[in-house]
Image (cartoon, grey):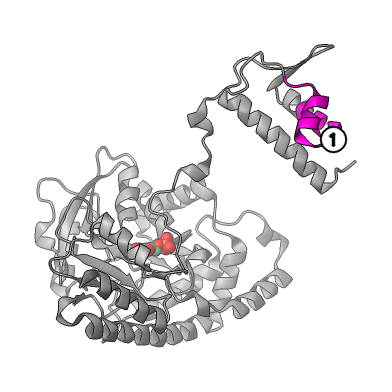
Amino acid sequence: MMNEPKQMHLQEKIFLLLRQQILDGALSSGTRLLPSRVMAEELGVSRNTVLVAVERLVAEGYVVAKTGSGCYVNDNVALGTNATASLGAIAPTGFMPYRSDIVDFKSGLPDLSVFPVKRFGQLYRDVMDHITPAELGYGAPEGHIELRREIATYLQTYRGVRCDPASILITSGTTQAIGIAGSALFEGQSHPLAVIENPITVDIRRILQKLGAEIYPVPTDQWGLCTSALPSHKAPRCIYVTPSHQYPLGAILSAKRRVKLIEYAQKSNCYIVEDDYDSEYRFDGHPISAVQGLCPKRVIYIGTFSKTLSPALRIGYLVLPPSLIAGARQMKWLTDLHNSVFDQLVLARFIRGGHYYRHLMKMKKRYRSKRDFLLACLQQHMGERAKIIGENAGLHLCVQFPGVVFSKNLLDNLEQAGVRVYPVWEHAGTDTSFDDTIILGFGMLSPEKIDKGIGILKQILL
Ligand SMILES: Cc1ncc(COP(=O)(O)O)c(C=O)c1O
């Protein structure tokens, strides 16, 4: 017979509590558990509830029942406190939840208040109404063909990427795409060298490092990656670049350097990894076309829907040169088999129905006006004290305050005063030359919040 939910809840709680004490060693081997009647009285629950919890401890081997004398903690079932520390105590690196109670200038977040919730709801309903048994089973690791077709058309039309559905692999965002590309690239290589831009999103550096790569940071300036500083002592396995919108400083890789980069990659037989994370939002001039279109054999192109729709979708993609498709496909399969088929179908139909393009146009206007408002606030409150960097595209810009050092202490003070800003140094390894520069993401913020945030910044900094 099924237990009442409330009763089940209590039994579960008592079981978990006793198990934790046994694992931690607080109840050591040979200790006799309190008689069930006493425990029930102490806990204010029925004896039956305690008995069920203890029976489960016996069944799982934490406790041994001795007829007539009671229940005893078994031998060798303690793990020690480190192994059982609650996950909550270990903060995942880099993850800071967005704070809507203050002005949080977190970068890389689109305006989630206007995510097309209704349309997605309709499409989910529609997809579920027509889903076939075959689609409910395991899918292809490279992703659903419907979505890969839509992405291929989009990339050819808008990004100058040379691809077809067969060269596309759907991933859980850029983050997984880097892991998959890195694994495919580094397999069988001893001490592979990975060139990254300096600065670059700290997690990109971490992922490549975790995959066993030696990291070689190359500086960036107003024309993007300084190709003259590429390594000459050893050929890298890959060069990771954000050529359409350098993260976080915003430069576009110049045409001359694009050519130099490709020449270098060809000469040293390495791959360029092109992270095209938010190039849809270029406010001044034409969108920058992808490096991939210039040399598809040497470039692994990565795109994401995190900035144009929502990071919660967890959908991104790789466009791979033929030589890497099999390796990447296998790595995706071994990682998580494939992305959710439902999400892929919904997204494919969102794009095919023309909604994605309309959404992009709408959002571009919205971000342009937020960007303009932020620039006006900075000008009004900070004047010449603030040097703006990389304001022509994307969902963030950088501001340099010569003479200010954005120490941990200063950042904490700002947050206590009601504004959270993000230092560039976090993404620059040991390089201290960006200590005076912060990243201001504006995608999520209303004009009121932007104004308030810059006002607080002024009070504390100037
Ligand atoms: C440079 C860069 N690329 C890509 C991403 C997007 O990652 P994902 O697609 O995994 O959400 C980010 C996230 O902030 C980023 O900073």
> Which amino acid, by three-letter code, is at mark 1?
Ser
Magenta span: helix, strand or loop, mainly?
A: helix
**Up-down: is 374 above or below 95?**
below
Residue beneath the point at 27% across and 55% down: 408
**Up-down: is 177 above or below 285?**
above
Q: Secondary structure at mark 1?
A: loop
Residue beneath the point at 60% across and 62% down: 341
The spot of residue 208 in percent (x, y) is: 31, 48
Residue 49 falls within the magenta-colored stretch = yes
> With 392 as the anchor, is 340 left or right in this view?
right
Q: Which residue is mark 1?
A: 46
- Note whether residue 453 is visible: yes
The spot of residue 67 in percent (x, y) is: 83, 12
- Neighbour tally class for label 1: few under 14, some 14-19, many 20 plus, Cα within 10 Å: some
> With 1 as the anchor, is 413 left or right in this view?
left
The spot of residue 321 in percent (x, y) is: 34, 60
**Residue 122 in which image quadrant:** bottom right
- Note whether residue 160 is visible: no
**Residue 449 in which image quadrant:** bottom left
**Residue 49 in which image quadrant:** top right
- Read off the magenta span: 33-54
The spot of residue 196 in percent (x, y) is: 23, 55
* Quadrant of ligand 1 in image: bottom left
Quadrant housing the N terminus: top right
Residue 100 falls within the magenta-colored stretch = no
> Of residues 247 and 358, which is closer to you in this image?
247
**Up-down: is 275 above or below 379?**
above
> Of residues 23 and 180, which is closer to you in this image?
23
> Of residues 23 and 292, which is closer to you in this image?
23
